[in-house]
Amino acid sequence: MASYDPDPKMKFSFGLWTVGNPGRDPFGLPTREVISPTEICNLLGEVGAWGVNLHDTDLVPIDSTQQERDRIVKDFKKSAKENGLAIPMCSANLFSEPIFKDGAYTSNNARVRAYAVQKTIRAMDLGAELGCKYYICWGGREGIESDATKDPVEAIKRFRECINFICHYNKEQGYNYKVCFEAKPNEPRGHMYFAVTGSYLAVIPTLDFPEMCGVNPEVAHEHMAGLNFVHHVAQAIEAGKLFHIDLNDQEFGRYDQDFRFGSANLKHAFFLVKLLQDHGYNGPRQFDAHAYRQADYEDVEAFASGCMRTYMILKEKVDRWNGDKEIQQLVKLVNQSDPLEKLTKKFSAANAQKLKQAPLDRHKIASERLPYERLDQLTMEVIMGVR
């Protein structure tokens, strides 16, 4: 029987805020006791995770003294090491404190923007001390409820200025972070700036250090808007900008549910795993998800194990799909090549002239078979485990 234990090469990681989530939601108080970063590391070590991630204040309470901070960081590093955990990613929480009620980098208030950048570079210092290589920017409050309140063009300019500052700091300090942007369409703001992954892919080339910056797409955030997450990740891969990824699951069109990976849209999860595996993605795979509010910590362990196990099961099914002779014959049939293809790969006046004169019979071409029903059914049979 196949083993679906987590493979260290998959670089499965969890944030302190994920398995440590106490079951709180906007309408209800916590249903689990808060556990310490050390206890979280112990839990992740037990389930075989590769890494643990953090926001600055997940680890160090915001009003800690320097002495308290140093002790907490020392204990966390020790616990991560004892449990065989890497600490690949950090971020600054720029959304929980009241000062960020109207945004951080896009706030109308210059002092808020200054505080946001200050908090960011301190979080980068913390992450560098822990050995982090990825810095995630999620603009949790970067948006509006009413466009009467902000000029969106100015908001984009302010965002760029702040990002350029932190990228210069990253370079000057020699931290060598990969700076990753995470998009979300709404929640907690009514309308978020940079709503989808493509929004950030458009901004990156305008930054001072575009080579330093990429994206960290999250399944739930694109599914909230009813979009095909696989296509957004594919765009990031094609652009060479998929630096980090957040895996979870989500019913389409709902609030941010952060379900266990593969628990809501298994077919989408299959094609996401296929995309990542087929295109050789080798960065961290973070499960930015939460256990059900009804779970106790024994069930939270089942949740964390389940995220990784589902990925490993789907990886095996991807291998089966890729090795299935009938499926691959159909794939070959529907992906037809032709010598004319050479004409459209690279423009020249000669190629344009040849293309104009090419005998392309639209009726004949339209009559060629595309047996997509059969291909999709065979795919479903692989996913359902009967093929």
Image (cartoon, helix red, strand yellow):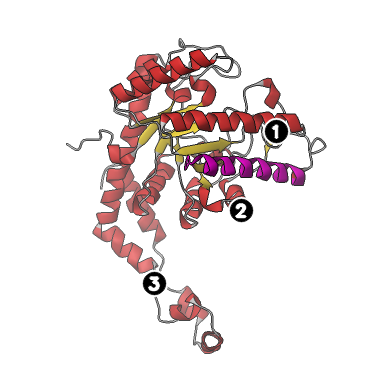
Answer with mark 2 or mark 3, whichever residue precedes in sequence.
Answer: 2
Observer-nearest of 174 and 86: 174
Residue positioned 47% across, 31% down in the render: 127
Considering the numbered disc 2 on the image, is that residue within a helix, a strand or a loop? helix
Inter-mark Cα distance, 1 to 3? 53 Å
Return the x and y of residue 160 as percentages of the image width and height.
Answer: 66, 45
Can residue 28 be seen from the camera position used here? yes
Mark 1 Cα shell of 10 Å, populated few (<14), some (14-19), many (≥20) = many
Which SS class for mark 1? Answer: helix
Tell me where residue 137 appears, x and y as whole percent: 56, 37
Amino acid type at image mark 1: Arg
Question: Which secondary structure is most common in the magenta stretch?
Answer: helix
Q: CA distance from mark 2 to mark 3?
A: 32 Å
Q: What numbered label is drawn on residue 113? A: 1
- Nearer to us of marks 1 and 3 is 1
Q: Are marks 2 and 3 in contact (CB under 8 Å)?
A: no
Instruction: Tell me where the magenta segment starts and ends, as one range.
Output: 153-177
Furthest-left residue in this view: 1
Residue ID for mark 3: 336
Residue 195 visible to the viewer: no
Q: Is residue 129 magenta?
A: no
- Closest to the camera, between mark 2 and mark 1, is 1
Mark 1 or mark 3: whose residue is earlier in sequence: 1
Identity, as a three-letter code, of the amino acid under mark 2: Ala
Q: Nearer the viewer, mark 2 or mark 3?
A: 2
Mark 2 lies on residue: 202
